[in-house]
Image: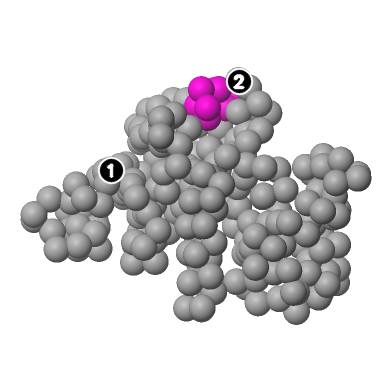
Amino acid sequence: MNKTKVLEVKNISKKVKGKRILEDVSFDLYSSDICGFVGPNGSGKTTLIRILTGLIHPTKGAVFINGKNINERQASALQNVGAIVESPIFFPYMTGKQNLINLARITHGVNKGEIKEKVKEVLKVVGLEDRGNDKVGSYSLGMKQRLGIAQALLGEPRFIILDEPSNGLDPLGMKQLRELILSLNKNKEITFLISSHLIKELEVVCHSWVMINKGSIVWQGKSRELGDKYEDLEQKFIGLMSQ
Ligand SMILES: Nc1ncnc2c1ncn2[C@@H]1O[C@H](COP(=O)(O)OP(=O)(O)OP(=O)(O)O)[C@@H](O)[C@H]1O
């Protein structure tokens, strides 16, 4: 399979009120990668993800998605991108299905005649087909996260960005989320960038890694490129963070 460059992060720096939050961050992501973007609390992960999704602008540098500069051609750069930054917000008094039907129409522009089928399909993909008619207020956090992914799938994304998706999930919720990510990657060839401060949670799903500390990248590579010095990824992570 020919891999194409999905994301190019080029020399990104961000300062807020004189405070340096990101410094010269660069990395690339290729189609079908599942990349773990890991760093301790406060290392700059959410700030970078907010830049990648066009929510804020970098002080320096540029981001290209599928070759399009996100600050110059935002709509077309983000066309095939699904992102869940912070917990997705749904109306708790409406069912999962009703929430998705509204979002399909308003946010994703799905054709009126296709909405019902599309919503049914994405609910099935995320394993919520039996709970679609229940109110979102009755959903567990894990179910809300999967509903968030169902919403992203309405836009037929090729690339999904998840910011700390396992925050607050119990072990079963985490397992279901991991299985969903792996199946979307395998069956729909969706590329993922997933942030977390807990490397262990991502080890089963990620093929490649970007490690960040205090706003700068400290290591990037594949799990197999770890080197002999470290027993496992977490040891490497801890070693790099304490330098
Ligand atoms: N608008 C802002 N104004 C001032 N400081 C900010 C702003 N946004 C982020 N920061 C600071 O930048 C640093 C990085 O924050 P960020 O939320 O990107 O980290 P993170 O790696 O996502 O952390 P966590 O794992 O805790 O979510 C933190 O010290 C944070 O307080």
Q: Farthest right residue?
A: 113
Residue 146: image location, x then y, percent = 63, 64
Q: Residue at x 12, y 50 (%)?
A: 227
**In which image quadrant can residue 147 be found?**
bottom right
Residue 164: image location, x then y, percent: 50, 59
Q: Which mark is residue 172?
A: none
Work out whether mark 1 precedes mark 2 in sequence or the reverse, and give the earlier one.
2
Q: Quadrant of residue 221?
A: top left
Say if residue 123 shows up in the picture: yes
Q: How many marks?
A: 2
Q: Secondary structure at mark 1?
A: strand
**Residue 72: numbered disc:** 2
Query: Farthest residue in the left direction?
Result: 228
Q: Which residues are magenta?
A: 63-71
Q: Is residue 90 left or right of residue 217?
A: right
Q: Is 162 a magenta residue? A: no
Horizontal and vertical percent position of residue 180: 54, 61
Q: Is residue 160 left or right of residue 38?
A: right
Residue marked by disc 1:
220
Quarter of the figure that contains the N terminus: top left
- Residue 183 % position (x, y): 52, 57
